[in-house]
Image (tube, rainbow, N blue to C red):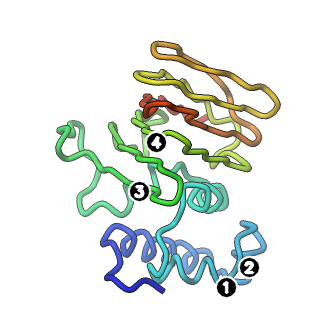
Amino acid sequence: MRSEDPDPVDVRIGARLAALRAQHGWSLGELAERSGVSRSTLSRAERAEISPTAALLNRLCQVYGRTMSQLLSEVEAAGPVPLVRAADQQVWEDRASGFVRRSVSPPHAGLRGELVEGRLAPGADIAYDRPPVPGLEQHLWVLDGTLEVTDGERAHRLGTGDCLRMRVHGPTRFRCAGPGTARYVLAVVRP
């Protein structure tokens, strides 16, 4: 258990995850079977006793059929708007992995594309066992630093200015070997 108060974003994420589970009529055990995440971890995330990692949210997004941006936008106070100023763009941090994610363009139910800015600290390594939505198209453009990306069995080393396009059906991995932070833009297009 945390000794300090939970992060308000973690509280809203936890409440949204609990609401999604309730909407589907699933017990913690059923969700654990569907997601491959333990009941205790799911329970602690819903109660904001832990800050969910990117990998955990990715697994739950896959089960619920939404992208991470969609899930994170659902915990925003306001609904989607056509213009989001830089100061108002939602930032979420996976403290465990050193990953910072900025939702540049919040998703809207009628749109298939979104832009995300990602930052990985040196040594950060994020592995996703599956995409949140099978067949998701991603265009990854490195703005600064070096990023190692694995899509299934294919490994790519990207430097500043490089762009990788991939359609994601299986596991992916994003790693910043350093020495500096890797900063990139990810354009995500739902199938």
Kindly indicate whether the residue at mark 1 contacts the one at mark 2 (C-beta within 8 angstroms): yes
Q: Amino acid at mark 2?
A: Glu
Residue at 43% over, 83% down? 2
Residue 27, which numbered label?
A: 1
Q: Is residue 175 above or below residue 88?
A: above
Query: In the displayed structure, does residue 129 sit left or right of residue 99?
Result: right
Residue at 17% over, 44% down? 87
Q: Is residue 43 above or below residue 69?
A: below
From the image, tell me which residue sits under label 4. Answer: 121
Residue 72, which numbered label?
A: 3
Q: Earlier in the sequence, mark 3 or mark 4?
A: 3
At mark 2, the secondary structure is helix
From the image, tell me which residue sits under label 2. Answer: 30
Q: Around disc 2, counting alpha carbons within 10 Å, would you say few (fewer than 14), some (14 to 19), or many (20 or more)? A: few
Q: Amino acid at mark 1?
A: Ser
Kindly indicate whether the residue at mark 4 contacts the one at mark 3 (C-beta within 8 angstroms): no
Q: Nearer the viewer, mark 4 or mark 2?
A: 4
Kindly indicate whether the residue at mark 2 contacts the one at mark 4 (C-beta within 8 angstroms): no
* Number of marks in the rendered image: 4
Q: Amino acid at mark 4?
A: Ala
Tell me residue 163's x, y (percent): 54, 16
